[in-house]
Amino acid sequence: MPFPWFRDSVTRVRAPLVTNPYGDPVRDWASAVRTTLTGWRVQPVQGSRQTAAETIPRDGLERNRRAFGPIGADIETTDRIEWAGVTWVIDGDVDRWRGPTGRLAHTEILLTRMEG
């Protein structure tokens, strides 16, 4: 049963694995499938300034959001998430947390994107 304050919808973007001309597996984002997922809560997380590597002549601002969703959410670390008109990447693992009773309570993911 979702929490009543989990009213956000996110779009999961899942790209199939294909083989590139060098024989390596890569994600085909042009053929990605978009699925709307309901029962989420997306909240801001403090961002930070990132100095780019020497080879990239620019600095950037890292934006982060934390998304909380249903226990059984079909989310993989290789998915992308669209929320509020912006595409985010999943930073780290898809965490499934237990509540005080020991039962699984919710799914949590950290979303990241760069600006600048």
Image (cartoon, rainbow, N blue to C red):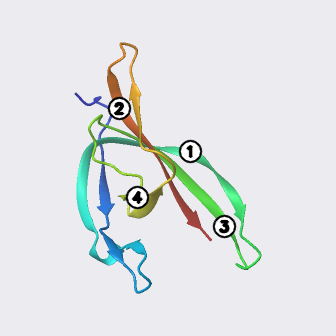
Say what secondary structure mark 1 lies in. Answer: strand
Distance, label 2 to label 4, CA atoms, is 19 Å
Question: What's under tag 1, amino acid-wise?
Answer: Val
* Among the two numbered marks 2 and 4 on one chain, the one whose residue lies closer to the N terminus: 4
Q: What element carries label 4?
A: loop
| Residue nearest the viewer, comparing 15 with 70 | 15
Q: Quadrant of the N terminus?
A: top left
Q: Position of residue 33 (x, y in %)?
A: 24, 66
- Say which residue appears at 29% left-offset and 29% top-offset: 3
In screen coordinates, is 52 left or right of 20? right
Precedes in sequence: disc 1 or disc 2: 1
Screen quadrant of the C terminus = bottom right
Does 42 sit left or right of 35 as displayed? right
The answer to whether the residues at label 1 and label 2 have Cβ atoms under 8 Å apart is no
Q: In this view, does 114 lie above or below 106?
A: below
> Which residue is labeled 1 in the image?
45
Q: What residue type is labelled 2?
A: His
Q: Position of residue 38 (x, y in %)?
A: 25, 45
Q: How crowded is mark 1: few (under 14 residues within 10 Å), some or many (20 or more)?
A: few
Q: How packed is label 4: few (under 14 Cα within 10 Å), some, or many (20 or more)?
A: some
Give the labeled residue for mark 3: 60
C-alpha distance separating marks 1 and 2: 18 Å
